[in-house]
Image (tube, helix red, strand yellow):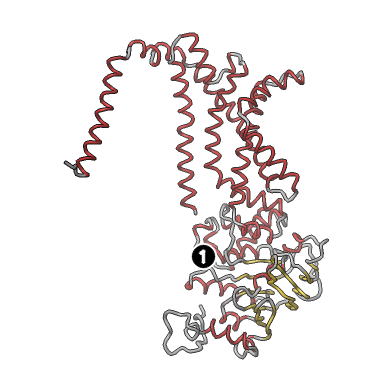
Amino acid sequence: MRTDGEPATAGRAIEVEGLHKSFGALEVLKGIDFSVERGEVVCVIGPSGSGKSTLLRCVNLLEEPTAGRVTVAGTEVTDPDVDIDRVRRRIGMVFQSFNLFPHLTVRENLTIAQRRVLRRDRAAAQRVARANLARVGLSDKETAYPAQLSGGQQQRVAIARALSMEPELMLFDEPTSALDPELVGDVLAVMRSLAQDGMTMLVVTHEMSFAREVADRVVFMDGGVIVEEGPPERVVADPQHERTRTFLARVLDPAAAGLSEVPEAGAPGAEEERPAP
Amino acid sequence: MPLSRRRRARLLRGGQYAVLAAAVLVLALVADWGTLRHAFFDVEVAKALFPDIITTALVNTVLYTLLGFGFGLGLGLVLALMRLSQVPPYRWLAVTYIEFFRGVPALLVFIALGFGVPLAFEVALDMNITVMLSLGLVGAAYMAETIRAGIQAVPKGQTEAARSLGMSPGRAMRSIVIPQAFRIVLPPLTNELILLTKDSSLVYLLGLSLGQFELANFGRDALNEHKSLTPILVAGLLYLVITLPLGQLVRRLEARTAKAR
């Protein structure tokens, strides 16, 4: 996907070098080096507090890195002279808590930034909005308000809102963590189809089945560093590090880790965390 | 003999009724009903007040209130944004303003603008301007704090979502945060409107011409004319005609807000 006006520059979609981030005395990211190629889907997994959300938020500068360089589609966002608003237009972001604008209808949620930021006229903005609503399967909700939608629908609207800016890449910050289990599938299905269409995606998630099926690469983070990364069949199925193994054991089989109240009989190391929709 | 708890409660209640009945009885016997009725409920006097008390006084009360409210709301919004500014001097200015105008009596502001400014600068301010400034300057201080609280009550994720769509900080504030903040502060702002409605009676001080009379002034004038409290009572009731529906509105808005959360 291309943005209007912005030349698609050569190079990687995301390049992170020596990234450090501290909140006061607490160092959350302790030197991160990694990159995302164009068209690549990268899932970041790891225990809570490992810094994976912070890493994601440093990519579009919602968090200001303490040190290091972040380059997105050829533009160094950590350069103090860069116009971050211009860069952010090209980066779609989906939040754990949806963050739809509650005072606007679904359609207005999708058009407001197109109109105010991209200066599209009403008709063009609505055309794009309709196409993206259809894409997430919510064409009938154009005039609804966010509060009238279920969590899963809200998150799909949030994805459509980000897509309406026609971004070059998408960031997903635990997009299904706030959803009731039965609503997760629809959101993942939308993300899966985006990936199939070649969208560059950086996804912080706990959905191991999604990571295994959809990701080109999985990054495991713990304690503010990348412990290991590689194709999902290696990182998820055959982790090299003890920390990765411990984490995966807990996530994939809560029963074995003593976290589940209702152990599923005959499912040790269950392959599917949740059936695909 | 110790009384049971229930008996003691019944006796206590009976005693309270007895006191009330006695008070009513004394009032009925002692009060001079003819005088009282002439003072408060003189129908002839009341009739003479209409229609001017509506067409002039009530209209002017609403006009002065809206002038003050409009100016105060605009200034209050500016002060609220200054109070939240990244630039410390703006914050200091806003805090100083708010603390000052919340702390001084509105009456003093009216005197300053109605008499002080014309004398000191030798300018004659238009009556409506004087009222607008006097009511607005004080109202702005209260509204600024209300609006600031409203802006801060909008979740941070809203700004983050707006910014990540490429909106500038100002655009995110205008299109996303402030509209939501206003919905949050609608009930307290309506309360402020009620307070301003009553404060508009301070215009009384400025020495108005007949056509500029608002309710309090009109009542006072008619009181002198008729030697009856009736005009004051009618004026009071007309204030209630404005403020009671507003109070009702506040309750309804609050209920709606509570439901939306």
Position of residue B129 relative to residue A144, above or below, is above
**Residue furthest to the right:** A81
Give the percent coordinates (x, y) of residue B149. Answer: 60, 47
For label 1, count other residues whose C-alpha is less than 10 Å away and answer few (under 14), some (14-19) or many (20+). many
Residue drawn at x 49%, y 70% is A183
Q: Name the image quarter holding residue A69.
A: bottom right
- Element class at badge 1: helix
Give the percent coordinates (x, y) of residue B203. Answer: 59, 22
Position of residue A53 relative to residue B80, above or below, is below
Which chain letter matches label 1? Answer: A
Q: Name the image quarter holding residue A66.
A: bottom right
Position of residue A200 relative to residue B241, above or below, is below
**Residue furthest to the left:** B1
Give the percent coordinates (x, y) of residue B33. Answer: 32, 13
Q: Is residue B93 left or right of residue A193?
A: right
State the quadrant of the N terminus of chain B: top left
Residue drawn at x 66%, y 44% is B80
Residue drawn at x 72%, y 22% is B117
Looking at numbered disc 1 in the image, what kind of residue is underneath it? Gly
**Residue furthest to the front:** B1
Q: Is residue A219 left or right of residue B87?
A: left
Give the percent coordinates (x, y) of residue B170. Answer: 71, 50
Position of residue A70 relative to residue B83, above or below, is below
Of residues A182 and B157, the one nearer the viewer is B157
Which residue does the numbered mark 1 point to in the structure image? A151
Of residues B56 and B254, the one nearer the viewer is B254
